[in-house]
Amino acid sequence: MTKRSSAQAHMVVGIGVLTFQIHDCRSLKTKRSIVKTIIHQIQNNFNASVAEVGANDIHQRAQIGFALAGSDHQVINAKIDKIINFAEDLGLAQMIDSEMEIIHL
């Protein structure tokens, strides 16, 4: 690991995991359709890296992770808040948990 000089820019990375309950979902095919829609909506609206990261074989639960990078802590924090609210407001599944972390490099 190298020390950065005072003139070197710093990077702020925001990461999060959203956990959803998908009511009345009886098949993985139905779940995948809902998860893909949530992922694409977040990607298209926030230019974030987004993927299903857990609960892959559970019909009624989904975990979706996302990551953002930038240089301003406040901007990354605001975008994370907007992503969480946006995903919940989509109404495709009930958000039952959200975790987030901001890392400075």
Image: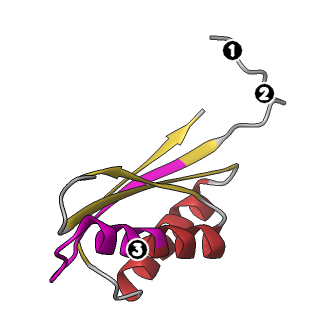
User: Which residue was labeled with disc 3?
Assistant: 33
Magenta range: 14-36
The label on residue 15 is: none
Image quarter of residue 85: bottom left
Residue 102 lies in the magenta stretch: no
Residue 32 lies in the magenta stretch: yes
- Residue 70: x and y in percent read 68, 51
Colour theme: secondary structure
User: Which residue was labeled with disc 2?
Assistant: 6
Query: Helix, strand, or loop for circle 2?
Result: loop
Give the CA distance from mark 2 to mark 3.
47 Å
Residue at 47% x, 54% y is 51
Q: Type of residue at label 2? A: Ser
- Residue closest to the eye, 34 or 76: 34
Give the CA distance from mark 2 to mark 1.
9 Å
- Residue 62: x and y in percent read 27, 62
- Residue closest to the eye, 33 or 81: 33
The label on residue 3 is: 1
Query: Helix, strand, or loop for circle 3?
Result: helix
Sequence-earlier tag: 2 or 3 = 2
Category of crowding for the residue at label 2, using alpha-carbon neighbours closer than 10 angstroms: few (below 14), some (14–19), many (at least 20):
few
Residue at 46% x, 50% y is 15
The N terminus - image quarter: top right
The reply to whether callout 2 and callout 1 are in contact (CB within 8 Å) is: no
In the displayed structure image, the side of residue 51 where residue 40 appears, left or right:
right
Q: In this picture, is 14 found above or below 32?
A: above
> Closer to the observer: label 2 or label 1?
1
The reply to whether callout 2 and callout 3 are in contact (CB within 8 Å) is: no
In the current view of this chain or complex, which residue is farthest to the top?
1
Query: Helix, strand, or loop for circle 1?
Result: loop
Q: Type of residue at label 3? A: Ser
- Residue 80: x and y in percent read 49, 65
